[in-house]
Image: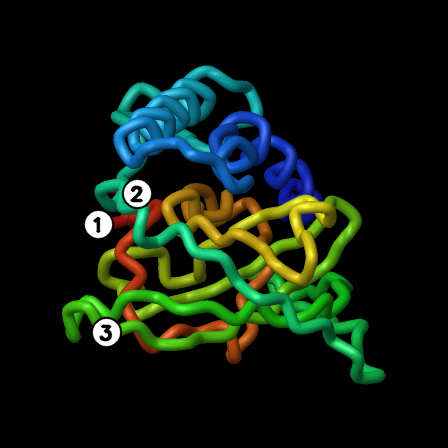
Amino acid sequence: MLKNKFLQLLIAIVIIGVIGYTFFGEETTVSDADYVAQLEKDRKEKDKFYQDSDTSPIGDKTAFKGLNYFVPNPAYKVVATVIPYHAQDKQVAVPMTDGSTTTYEKYGFAEFTLPDASKAAELNVYRLLIYKHEKGLSILFRDATAPEETYGGGRYLDFKTDDVTDGKLTLDFNVAYNPYCAYNPTYACPIPPKENTLPVRVEAGEKIYEKYE
């Protein structure tokens, strides 16, 4: 099992697949139209990486037609309040999909609001645990779209530690991505903690790859 490939994944996804996240992670005056255009450009670049790269998790590249996504929706780019984790059990053994574990640190919780698709304009407050590791910060989560529409093993959001500014962190669920184990079982990936299961549908980001539909 290629357990360490998850760390390589963080680098590859941040550079190739989430180029727009750094750009849009800061407060700017970018219009919704420009935001969507940049996001779609980044998705095309990620498809090219998966199609051409020697480190792509796609086994049969001849059948690869691109990844599946929800339609870009700026409403799923939200600013969260970061609540630091101060308890003594900061170090946590995170289970991997191959049955092993990897050690992360509980950095804190991201508290934010999201639109509830079933209740029109209603906003609800949610909280997700943030992990810290040698590459930065990550949120591993599931939501009510899984496992029918999104990968049942969860989706990820990655950040640099300095993305947390004045106790705030921008979460852009439009760039939520699947780990490599969603495409290739030879990869081992960390499993989201139980508390990171959102009861609401997050209709943003990457969907199940068509091979698994």
Residue bearing the label numbered 2: 209
How crowded pointer 2 is (Cα within 10 Å; few <14, some 14-19, many 20+) is rated as some
Q: Residue at x 50, y 43 (%)?
A: 180
Q: Nearer the viewer, mark 3 or mark 1?
A: 3
Q: Is residue 175 left or right of residue 85?
A: left
Instruction: Measure the C-alpha gap from mark 1 to mark 2.
Output: 7 Å
Q: Residue furthest right?
A: 88
Q: Secondary structure at mark 2?
A: loop
Residue 187 is labelled as none
Residue bearing the label numbered 3: 122
- Where is residue 142 shown, x and y percent of the image? 41, 66
Residue 202 versus residue 6: which sits nearer the camera? 202
User: Mark 1 near mark 2, Cβ–Cβ under 8 Å?
Assistant: yes
Sequence-wise first label, 3 or 1: 3
Q: Is residue 15 left or right of residue 73?
A: right
Count of marks overlaid on the render: 3
Q: Is residue 45 left or right of residue 92?
A: left
- Where is residue 73 shown, x and y percent of the image? 27, 46
Q: Residue at x 19, y 67 (%)?
A: 117
Residue 1 versus residue 26: which sits nearer the camera? 26
Q: Nearer the viewer, mark 3 or mark 2?
A: 3
Badge 1 amino acid: Glu
How crowded pointer 3 is (Cα within 10 Å; few <14, some 14-19, many 20+) is rated as few
Badge 3 amino acid: Glu
Badge 2 amino acid: Tyr
Instruction: Measure the C-alpha gap from mark 3 to mark 1.
Output: 31 Å
How crowded pointer 1 is (Cα within 10 Å; few <14, some 14-19, many 20+) is rated as few
Q: Residue furthest front?
A: 29
Residue bearing the label numbered 1: 213
Sequence-wise first label, 3 or 2: 3
- Where is residue 93 shown, x and y percent of the image? 73, 71
